[in-house]
Image: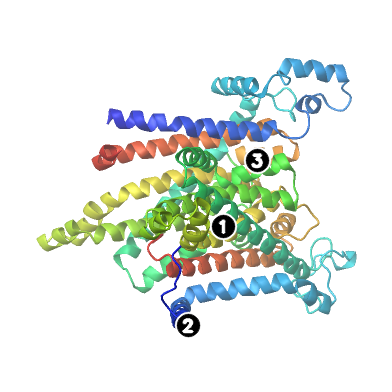
């Protein structure tokens, strides 16, 4: 690389300060644009609220003296009251505490699946863009995986691996990777054609340096948007799997599992269904709205 | 066109190969011995070893894969390990009808809701009606089918008592009216999410067409609005809609696993979920393979329709 020797340190510092100022202004513009879209702000609020719920679940329930696991037989199937804000379930467990702890499970799974599939998918997509043979192999593999409907692939994986939290994360990550890899690959192919990458190549930068330092930052926007949507679909899939008894095993308070247990009490205990259902729907809605807003901001040409 | 069909068919080969290898390996690498499971707890080691040889479980993995593909092509998906001696193909055949009927019915509902709503939203762009449609479509996309199903049961079955909460009546054995009464709630819960998506796609496709030069031309010639919307607009948006209908059919078949369980419908989805508990991997493998292959075939048909309808596509390849 050519060194910036023609300028004095003061000039360079001034240039750097001007660049920072530009970046700050751009950020402020972006933030204003994001905030001007009411639906994405609603999404952001829901997402923040859910993450806070997940973080603070032990504190809040502890302060109220509630526990997600302790079953009090004489308090079975009680409707919402001051002592039990969301009522109690068929075993006399407090539904408020279980729903709050359920947020921990859902958010953890969404976050870990979203991040893992983004990291693995982006790496695969980046390397696929460098090599024709590798590209062909990886993309055919993605086509193959995508031909199996997501929920069926997840069910099959869970049946084979066995129902527990780790395996839910593994299955849902496998299901999400092809989508990210495709996006990363097609974006990387575009970016590699750009003049600045050619300039880097001419300047003698190594393959990996170009890939990770120059291509990666320029394909991140669509990947991040896809990650938000993967977060939402991981929450749906986990709830569906647990509802089928193939996800998080009981007695852990996952929303899907709670709904599965509540099925038998649909005539006698509406609160057993209503609260976990509303929380599941709200969090998925929140991440989808947030993702829509992010997409309009980061990636305005795609998707619409 | 012949060349186009040939190319499309050729491009299927790697996909089918990979799908089958993935599904085969998934189940093949499962911990646990299928022979021991089929014979139960009081089988002797000799019995298990004999069954191993009989089933070819000691052969190299490639040989086993080729043999498995050969059997699947002949419609033999193996023997169920849970229902002893029952061929998997028979099990699937006896659970096939409810799932297919449900998928078709839910797609009919989807089309009836989504296409008029999408066209309406495109026509009345920016009005309150358009926003209502948009809000519904975002909510629909965020609503897992079993949650919608639970909501529908609570409202229409428990509270209003209009429709039964669960159960199944066969179209052929019990007649049309009972079938519709029992299947409407499950079909709605399966179809609504896809209706949201189809609504969005119809709207986008219609907006694209309505903004094009030939529509402006037709308008300036004085063609009536209705004719523009249906004859010029919808016909050109139809290709997108066909794709979405094809995808919807597959997602209804896949989503059946959850919805059938919720409504106690004895279809392939229930069979699959039951098989998880019974560790009957042959059944899970067969159903997944079947739906994936159906998916590949439906996508092929959509591609062919595209090629037939739009010469640019088959020539560009």
Which of labels 3 and 1 is toward the front?
1
Hey, which quadrant is residue B3 in on the image?
top left
What residue would you read off at disc 3?
A156
Front residue of this view, candidates B85 and B178 = B85
- What residue appears at the point 48 percent right and 81 percent down from the top-left corner? A9
What residue would you read off at disc 1?
A230
Q: 10 Å neighbourhood of mark 2: few (<14), some, or many (≥20)? A: few
Q: Quadrant of the C terminus of chain A?
A: bottom left
What residue would you read off at disc 2?
A17
Residue B164 in picture, x, y percent from top left: 61, 52
Q: Element at badge 2?
A: helix
Q: Are marks 1 and 2 on the same chain?
A: yes
Front residue of this view, candidates B194 and A158 = A158
- What residue appears at the point 66 percent right and 71 percent down from the top-left corner? A51
Q: Marks 1 and 2, how far apart in space?
A: 37 Å
Q: 10 Å neighbourhood of mark 3: few (<14), some, or many (≥20)? A: many
Name the chain under label 1: A
Which of labels 3 and 2 is toward the front?
2
Residue A86 in picture, x, y percent from top left: 74, 72
Residue at the far left: name it.
Answer: B221
Q: Is residue B286 left or right of residue A270?
A: left
Q: Element at badge 3?
A: helix
Q: Is residue B171 visible?
A: no
**Mark 3 vs mark 1: which is more N-terminal?**
3
Name the chain under label 3: A
Q: Is residue A275 above or below residue B176?
A: below
- What residue appears at the point 68 percent right and 52 percent down from the top-left corner? A169
């Amino acid at each position: 690389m050519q060194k910036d020797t023609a300028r004095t340190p003061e000039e360079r510092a001034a240039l750097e300060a001007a660049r920072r100022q530009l970046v700050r202004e751009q950020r402020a513009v972006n933030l204003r644009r994001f905030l001007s879209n009411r639906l994405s702000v609603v999404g952001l609020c829901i997402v923040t609220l859910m993450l806070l719920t997940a973080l603070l679940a032990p504190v809040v329930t502890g302060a109220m003296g509630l526990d997600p696991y302790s079953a009090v037989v004489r308090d079975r199937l009680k409707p919402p009251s001051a002592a039990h804000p969301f009522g109690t379930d068929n075993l006399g467990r407090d539904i408020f505490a279980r729903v709050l702890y359920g947020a921990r499970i859902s958010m953890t799974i969404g976050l870990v699946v979203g991040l893992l599939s983004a990291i693995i998918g982006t790496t695969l997509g980046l390397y696929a863009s460098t090599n024709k043979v590798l590209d062909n192999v990886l993309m055919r593999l993605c086509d193959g995986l995508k031909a199996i409907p997501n929920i069926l692939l997840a069910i099959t994986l869970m049946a084979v691996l066995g129902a527990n939290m780790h395996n839910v994360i593994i299955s849902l990550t496998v299901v999400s990777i092809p989508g990210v890899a495709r996006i990363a690959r097609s974006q990387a192919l575009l970016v590699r054609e750009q003049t600045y990458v050619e300039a880097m190549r001419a300047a003698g930068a190594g393959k990996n340096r170009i890939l990770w330092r120059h291509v990666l930052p320029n394909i991140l926007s669509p990947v991040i948007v896809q990650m938000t949507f993967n977060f939402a679909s991981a929450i749906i899939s986990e709830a569906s799997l647990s509802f089928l008894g193939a996800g998080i095993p009981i007695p852990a308070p996952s929303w899907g599992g709670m709904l599965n247990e509540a099925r038998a009490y649909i005539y006698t205990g509406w609160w057993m269904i209503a609260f976990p259902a509303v929380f599941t729907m709200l969090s998925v809605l929140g991440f989808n709205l947030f993702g829509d807003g992010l997409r309009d901001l980061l990636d305005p040409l795609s998707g619409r | 066109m012949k060349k186009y069909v040939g190319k499309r068919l050729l491009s299927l080969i790697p996909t089918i190969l990979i799908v089958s290898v993935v599904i085969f390996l998934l189940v093949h690498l499962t911990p646990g011995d299928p022979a021991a499971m089929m014979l139960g707890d009081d089988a002797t080691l000799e019995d298990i070893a004999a069954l191993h040889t009989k089933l070819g479980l000691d052969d190299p993995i490639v040989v086993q894969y080729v043999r498995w593909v050969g059997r699947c092509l002949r419609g033999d998906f193996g023997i169920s390990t849970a229902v002893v001696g029952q061929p998997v193909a028979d099990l699937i055949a006896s659970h096939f009808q409810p799932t297919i009927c449900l998928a078709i019915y839910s797609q009919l509902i989807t089309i009836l809701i989504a296409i008029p709503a999408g066209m309406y939203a495109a026509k009345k762009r920016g009005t309150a009606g358009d926003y209502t449609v948009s809000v519904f479509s975002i909510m629909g996309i965020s609503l897992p089918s079993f949650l919608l199903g639970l909501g529908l049961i609570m409202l229409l079955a428990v509270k209003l008592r209009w429709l039964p909460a669960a159960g199944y009546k066969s179209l052929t054995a019990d007649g049309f009216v009972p079938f519709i009464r029992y299947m409407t709630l499950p079909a709605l819960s399966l179809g609504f999410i896809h209706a949201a998506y189809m609504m969005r796609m119809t709207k986008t496709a219609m907006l694209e067409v309505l903004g094009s030069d030939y529509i402006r031309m037709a308008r300036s010639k004085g063609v009536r609005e209705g004719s523009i919307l249906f004859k010029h607009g919808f016909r050109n948006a139809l290709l997108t809609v066909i794709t979405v209908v094809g995808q919807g059919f597959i997602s209804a078949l896949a989503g059946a696993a959850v919805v059938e369980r919720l409504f106690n419908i004895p279809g392939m989805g229930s069979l699959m979920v039951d098989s998880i508990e019974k560790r009957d991997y042959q059944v899970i493998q067969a159903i997944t393979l079947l739906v994936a292959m159906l998916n590949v075939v439906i996508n092929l048909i959509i591609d062919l329709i595209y090629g037939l309808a739009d010469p640019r596509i088959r020539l560009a390849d």
